[in-house]
Amino acid sequence: MSVLSCTDLSVAIAARPVLSGVDLTLSAGQVTAVVGPNGAGKSTLLACLGGLRTPTTGFASLGETRLLDLPPRERAQRLAFLPQTPEIAWAVEARTLIELGRIPFTGARGLSVEDRAAVDRAMAAAHVEAFEHRIVDTLSGGERARVLIARALAGEPEWLLADEPLTGLDPAHQLDAADLFRDLASKGAGVVVTLHDLSLALRTADRVIVLADGGVLSDGPPASALTPDILRRAYGVEAAVTSGPGGPLIDVLGRS
Ligand code: ADP
Ligand code: MG
């Protein structure tokens, strides 16, 4: 089973420590949610785990290989990264954008029948078939977010790292995307997502990592990683973990 890890990983930006000495071992077959307050370093951690940012010290590895030593093409085949604020450079049709997710496999050649089939599967999984021929900058933010999820899935990656993929989706599509992540994990992929919705993290993740002040404040099964005490220390809020008809809920009562 594939393992993605980081060892003594620190990042300083403009001489300010953003992450300090983070050690994590993530297993495929699970959905891992990374939560924490604004500025905690979630996006920075994800970028390091995706091999897109060079840490100041320490390293991230896929199996035994340091990510920055993996040939870029192999890295792109094995790890898909969905950024928080993706830039779409040109006005292209949604399908064309999703097909870009096959580039790590196709290189400069055109798409094979197999590539097209993978694109079709990704479009079906992300429920974006209806937008196939729409120009992406005419899509709503949530529709575009689903197209970008489809692009990440088109490469059928071993690991999907997605930075706030549910933000901007309506409740039905949030559930669909969360189900999709679960489904990928159940098929053996590793899924790492950053989330702001703590109840969603509690309900949909196998493992929750709470980042605060550049370090891991808690890490474990959702119910033990997201306790009122941890939420107070991470966010400075008083919160109650309650049970609703649909499962556990985090009710934020106010600032500490
Ligand atoms: P999160 O995703 O948890 O909100 P980030 O990883 O985006 O946090 O950022 C962590 C910290 O690093 C923040 O304080 C942010 O302002 C800072 N930071 C990130 N990128 C830059 C940058 N390019 N220049 C300066 N500061 C940055
Ligand atoms: Mg972020």
Image (cartoon, rainbow, N blue to C red):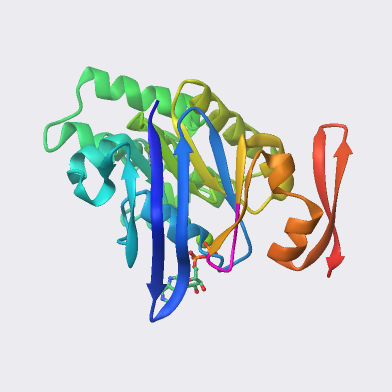
Residue 85 vs residue 43, the one in the foreground: 43
Q: Quadrant of the C terminus?
A: bottom right
Residue 69 vs residue 185, the one in the foreground: 69
Q: Position of residue 227 (x, y in %)?
A: 77, 50
The count of marks equals 0
Residue 164 vs residue 235, the one in the foreground: 235
Q: Characterize the magenta stretch by its predominant secondary structure.
A: strand
Is residue 60 rendered to the left or right of residue 227?
left
Q: Position of residue 15 (x, y in %)?
A: 39, 81
Q: Quadrant of residue 62?
A: top left
Q: Position of residue 228 (x, y in %)?
A: 81, 55
Residue 217 vs residue 31, the one in the foreground: 217
Find the magenta span and give its range: 210-214
Q: Is residue 133 visible?
A: no
Identify whether 42 is placed above or below 34: below
Residue at left offset 33%, top offset 65%: 57
Is residue 201 rendered to the left or right of residue 80?
right
Identify whether 188 is placed above or below 79: above
Q: Position of residue 125 (x, y in %)?
A: 49, 26
Residue at left offset 60%, top offset 29%: 179
Is residue 231 rendered to the left or right of residue 11?
right
Q: Quadrant of the N terminus?
A: top left
Q: As drawn, which residue projects farthest toward the left?
A: 109
Identify whether 70 is placed above or below 177: below
Q: Is residue 199 magenta?
A: no
Residue at left offset 47%, top offset 48%: 24
Q: Is residue 148 visible?
A: yes
